[in-house]
Image: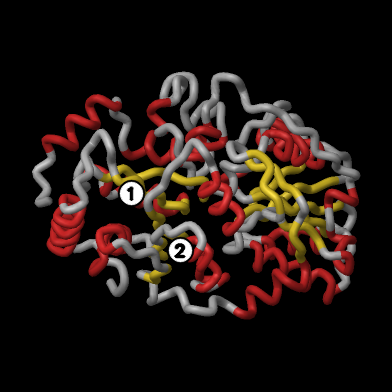
Amino acid sequence: MKFVDEFRDPTHAAALVREIGERVATLGRSPSRPLKIMEVCGGHTHSIFKYGIEQMLPPSIELVHGPGCPVCVLPVGRVDDAVKIAETPGVLFATYGDAIRVPGSRGSLLDAKAKGADVRTVYSPLDSLALARKNPDKRVVFFGLGFETTAPSTALTVLEAEASGVDNYFVFSNHITILPTIKAILDAPDLSIDGFIGPGHVTMVIGVAAYGFIADTYGKPFVIAGFEPLDVLQSLAMVVEQIARGEAKIENQYRRVVREGGNAVAQDAIERVFELRPHFEWRGLGTIEHSGLTFREPYARFDAEKAFAIRTVPVADPEQCQCGDVLKGVIKPWECKVFGTACTPAVPIGACMVSSEGACAAYYQYGRVSTSARAEARRELKVVR
């Protein structure tokens, strides 16, 4: 199968692991002082766990799982706002499936549905617009989530709603942007990253050149990667190669999908409908300036925050949940004191365990072992280095 089987070939994987190991060996790093490489995207985190990539690597490389899961970085206060809107009489609230169980301080959207709120799961914003057309007696609100990957589809749906005169359709926009997020990580005093595996799908929209500041200002290698195991391994090899040569460049491993200039149609749709918020709160990262998307004035009538007079009140995460530290890469999922015990996918405490892209959910699904057992497994692994 083109672009699948050939990107899962074990012979090529072994060769890439050997190449990575040989290069890292020249840097003189050790397990006590590993090379730290962050994969920004939650999709990469799942690929890494699913295919056992972390176990293939030498112990002198540490993969740091970044905040690239848009559901996971949604703060508790915004979840509370979504529940408040959904519980409003006469509202039909439409959401992606991985957001319906994210807990707020007043419960989740699924809890609201159980109490009688009309909450529906949809696969795209166009599905929510179809619900608005079929239910003219209700105010239909779509839960707009995601980075630049999903923002264009929301923007294009709003443009379609305007063109077709649908007046009972609204969007609760929690769309966010990737570049301020990476800058916040680079500026964080408690986290030192040697290089990055960049998000393939976001870059498909915004283009390669947008990341230039990471190399130019911060001097960090950044490689845009696909999502198959050989994509991830090749991208890691490219990052390590840059570090070994003392270089810092933006490289595109995912050239079969990502173009230098991105997708102009998608960029135009975002630019027409949305503008940057002055401030937006992220779970684990705090407030990041100019990182969230809100409606431009010509499209303000679609803004659920205005229609429902939403004023977000910051709410702290549950005391026992360390999702924020996981999102920043400060700790691994298994280091959280409630991971796999009080917090599981069936009964989640934090968003990282709920979303299909969350690091905690990925690690729970694909590899529940203790830190000591995991370290021992890496030492004993017989993969060619």
Residue shown at the point (12%, 62%) measured from the top left: 11
Would residue 315 appear left or right of 217 to someone viewing this image?
A: right
Residue at x 84%, y 60% (from the top left corner): 302
- Horizontal side, residue 210 vs residue 298: left or right: left
- Alpha-carbon distance for marks 2 and 1? 24 Å
Residue 357 in percent (x, y) is at 48, 47
Q: Residues within 10 Å of mark 1 (few under 14, many from 20)?
A: many
Label for residue 215?
Answer: 2
> Residue drawn 48% across and 78% down?
260
Q: Please indicate, yes or no, whether residue 56 appears anywhere in the rendered image.
A: no
The residue closer to the viewer here, 367 or 24, is 24
Q: Residue at x 52, y 42 (%)?
A: 355
Q: What is the three-letter code of the residue carrying label 2?
A: Ala
Whether tag 2 and tag 1 are in contact, CB under 8 A, the answer is no
Q: Which residue is mark 1?
A: 48
Q: Position of residue 175 (x, y in %)?
A: 67, 55
Is label 2 or label 1 in front?
2
